Image: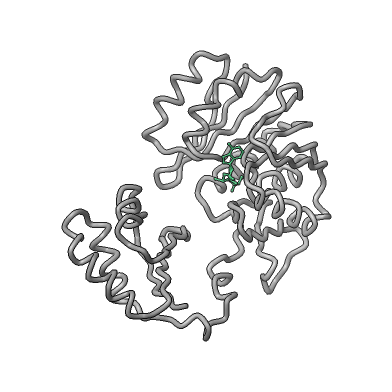
Amino acid sequence: MYTREFILKKRISEESLELLHQVCNLPFSEFELKNHFLITFYAKNPSEFDVISQLLNQLKLINSDLKDLEQGINNSKSINLSNVNMDNWKSFLSDIQISKSISIQMPWSDKIDANSILINPSLAFGTGHHQTTQSCIKILCRLKDENFNPKTALDIGTGTGILSFVCGKLFGCKIFAIDNDRNAIDQFNNNLELNKEIEGNYFVSFTSDIDFNKQYDLIIMNISSNYIMKNLEQILNLKNYKYIIISGFIFNDLQSINMCINDYKVKIVKLYSQDDWVTLGLINE
Ligand SMILES: C[S@@+](CC[C@H](N)C(=O)[O-])C[C@H]1O[C@@H](n2cnc3c(N)ncnc32)[C@H](O)[C@@H]1O
């Protein structure tokens, strides 16, 4: 197996990805780094990269994404994966200090600190490098500074469990985490094992269904805008919650979310944004 890998400054649009999937029979991936995107094409034989390069050359007039991909493929070298240390990707995931009290470390870090939260992402989402995760953590830290002390929290779309562990560290509360991806649940449990010292009672479930009979003081949802649009009303109908963090959407969606919120007795009290991503903090009045 061979790869060609390169960095792009902007995300490839959904339309270009769709087009590429239709015309290109080589698998490829897009991995978000801090402010860049790592694109990797895979092939059984290096000559297959020339074929895709010619194809992109013909298609590049359609849009600038395809032109960037063509340049990337042409300017990168084929790497034979059998000669590569497969743990190379780990070097892209560095430790990060998100606030004074919260730092996230990867288990392969060479300077493990007892106060940090250890996150092994494996196949689940949530390393702490994404803008939406960071904004959620910043709001959680602000809540702690403001002496908000939830007894129970619900983490919808928990992924690696990162936001649940931040809640545990800050509030030591009971945390219900849900995700509809089996890999996420497995990885949550692995990360729970890595973070045994962190306080909190954790209950993780492989489901998309929220238990509406439970009371959650704090609700966190860092999830797709589709999910938010579809489920927000139902979540706002939950009883007795005090605070909701909504994340995972972009500025274009803010108006629709605001319209939905307007029908409820909740008020936006925090708005964090990084790049185009928006995270809201809402109190239930
Ligand atoms: C953007 S990731 C957030 C991960 C982590 N909470 C963070 O903040 O970094 C969204 C997560 O939501 C999960 N998810 C997507 N749709 C879902 C659904 N309908 N029900 C439950 N989880 C869902 C995905 O599997 C993924 O792990």
Which residue is at the front of the view, 130 or 171? 130
Residue ranking furthest to the bottom: 83
- Which of the 4 quarters of the picture holds residue 50? bottom left
Point out residue 242 in the picture as x, y percentages from the top left corner: 67, 24
Query: What residue do we see at 29% from left, 69% from top?
Result: 52
Quarter, ligand 1: top right
Tally of numbered discs: 0
- Which of the 4 quarters of the picture holds residue 72? bottom left
Which residue is at the front of the view, 196 or 274? 196
Image vertical order of residue 200 relative to residue 148, above or below: below
Point out residue 93 in the picture as x, y percentages from the top left corner: 57, 65
Q: How is the image coloured?
A: one colour
Q: In this rendering, would 247 be left or right of 202?
A: left
Point out residue 283 in the picture as x, y percentages from the top left corner: 61, 24
Q: In this rendering, would 36 be left or right of 24?
A: right
Q: In this rendering, would 220 be left or right of 193?
A: left
Query: What residue do we see at 54% from left, 70% from top?
Result: 89
- Which of the 4 quarters of the picture holds residue 6? bottom left
Query: What residue do we see at 78% from left, 40% from top?
Result: 203
Q: Quadrant of the C terminus?
A: top right
Point out residue 20 in the picture as x, y percentages from the top left corner: 32, 57
